[in-house]
Amino acid sequence: MISTEQVIFCINPHCENPINSIGDAVCDSCQTPLVYRYLWASGASAARMKPGIKVADRYEVIAPQVWLDTQPGRSPIVPPELPPVIIPYLRLYPERLHLPQVYGFVPSEEADQGDILLLDNVPIDKDGNLYPSLNVAWEDAKPVRRVYWLWQILQLWTPLSELGLSQSLLTPNNLRVQGWCVRLLELHATTATAPPTLQDLAQSWQSLITATDTPITAALTNILQQMSNSAVELDTITTQLNALLLSTAAELPLTLQVGGATDTGMRLTQNEDTCFPQSLDHLHDSLIPKLSIVCDGIGGHQGGEVASQLAVQSLKLQIQALMAEIVQESEIITPQLLQEQLETCLRVVNNLISSRNDEQNRQGRARMATTLVMALQVPQRVSTLSGVKSENAHELYLASVGDSRAYWITRDYCQQLTVDDDVTAREVRSARSLYHQALQRPDAQALTQALGSRDAESLRFVIQRLILEEDGILLLCSDGLSDRNLVEKSWQDYALPILTGELALTDAVQQWIDLANQENGHDNISVVLILCRLSKNYLVPIPKAQPLAEIPPESKILDIAEIPPDISKLAEIPPLNSNIAEIPPLTSDITEIPQKFQNRKYHHWQKSNLNLL
């Protein structure tokens, strides 16, 4: 029907007058912030609906196939049995940075059409506008971003092909870009007799590459020619595109500045979080500013605190050895090899903590463990397109276990980079439930894995490779900050002043902790901010931080910039392809690690307002 009055409802279930006008920021009655959830309505039936129509007395059609849910506090319609069309969306939940997720259904008004599928987490901005298509954004994009977009498409090729969805990457209007990030509007099943091939992908890229003449055009043209050969392997193309991406990124300068702090919180007496860096003790650490870590310990007094500290200590030693080897390499180390090395590091950490549990005869929920989010900026040596030898190819590796998170923040957007390892994600990934349904479970936020909880071989490590090609802030934090979507609600107030030079990094760390104590406060809080700056054209003055003496004693903060690794102080470093597990741990009492661990049934770790159990 035609919408005569555009209203949006407050999500507060106790609001006495929840009706508000579209465009309002907060509810007139209870002052609760209004939620504007824009959705993509999939299918031909939805495409025929004109703006101004209200569907199912709930969804405002804002633009073709862009709908606004005016009652976001209500659950959408979901069939009792999940239809096959949505199963791929659920299976691909780990790729949510690039792919949409299922929100619900609306019965179609056309008799010959099925229900309309509504998609959330779509490339639509806060005002309901679609992000530009890759084709449109290509012309104004700098060379490194163009190659980065193609690299992301190539990384999505295998997971989508395995589910018969590679056609999704061949439809130009379906590929959208939010800054550096490629995002898809929806998934398209392959309808042709034969599945799409790399030759089809090359053909879809052809018009992009031939339309402009840049320093990367010749290299990309050569890659396209190889992709057109039916005998070419995906690994070959991946290797060549990666080399081009690194050499293009290395043309830009890169400076990093890091600040971190951890706080006990308002209700707890013990801080089980550990982060790196966090104090003046780290001032001359050779790993700054390349390595940043946040760990949220689990297991109570003398448990979680020990686990998180063990994780940080062990990782620092192993990463120091790995970085020393990397800077000696003359050839490009592939992302796959570096991801394998980092996974090995995490297995060592897991086994250290598990060994300590065994020594202390800890069983069930008494076993200590820790979440982890770690960022490592790897300074590989590469030759740029102009033939200059560069000391840094702008690679950033991100590892996560548990529910500690990483966000990438620029002037224009805030992107959650990691996916929580909790029951909600498990239920979605297993295609047993939609996301909003799984959130209703009493154990929705219970962790499904953490370092030290069980044998390393049964853990699922997620390690991503990002390219730093724009000015921005990488935020690592424990759930003391990220709970209740606090980062998504507050990023503009704290991150933007950093990027404009109005707020020092250390002050931003402290202010975000203060906000977490005010709005959450039930848990320990750890925050690490990494400010990434590239071209001098984009640099902004960073004001000097307040003296450390003026910072409240419960929060230790560090603000360090561009300290190169002091490789000369390192002892013998094992080769890059050696077994990192043989590197001795930092503390003498954990040098012996059992080679085998008994399989144990993993118990969910449920968080409460008073402690992490």
Image: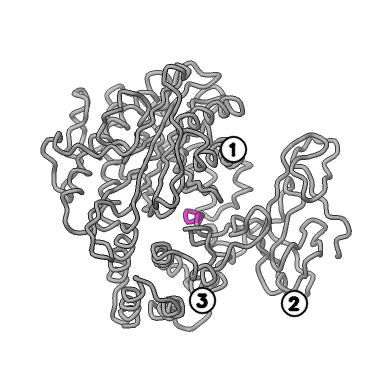
| The image quarter in which residue 542 lies | top left
Q: Of the residues shown, which amino acid type is indicated by label 3?
A: Thr
Secondary structure beneath label 1: helix
Residue 95 on the magenta segment: yes
| The image quarter in which residue 311 lies | top left
The percent coordinates of residue 237 (x first, y second) are 31, 71
Residue of label 2: 112
In the foreground, 221 or 49: 221
Structural crowding at the residue carrying mark 1, measured as other residues with C-alpha within 10 Å and reported as few (<14), some (14–19) or many (≥20): few
Residue 321 on the magenta segment: no
**Residue 137 vs residue 288: left or right?**
right
Task: Please identify, in this view, whether the residue under mark 1 or under mark 2 is nearer the observer.
Answer: 1
Task: Please identify, in this view, whether the residue under mark 3 or under mark 2 is nearer the observer.
Answer: 3
Instruction: Evaluate if marks 1 and 2 touch, with contact meaning CB atoms under 8 Å apart.
Output: no
Q: Of the residues shown, which amino acid type is indicated by label 1?
A: Asp
From this view, report whether residue 27 is shown above or below residue 129: above
Q: Of the residues shown, which amino acid type is indicated by label 2?
A: Asp
Residue of label 1: 493
In the foreground, 251 or 160: 251
The percent coordinates of residue 159 (x first, y second) are 43, 64
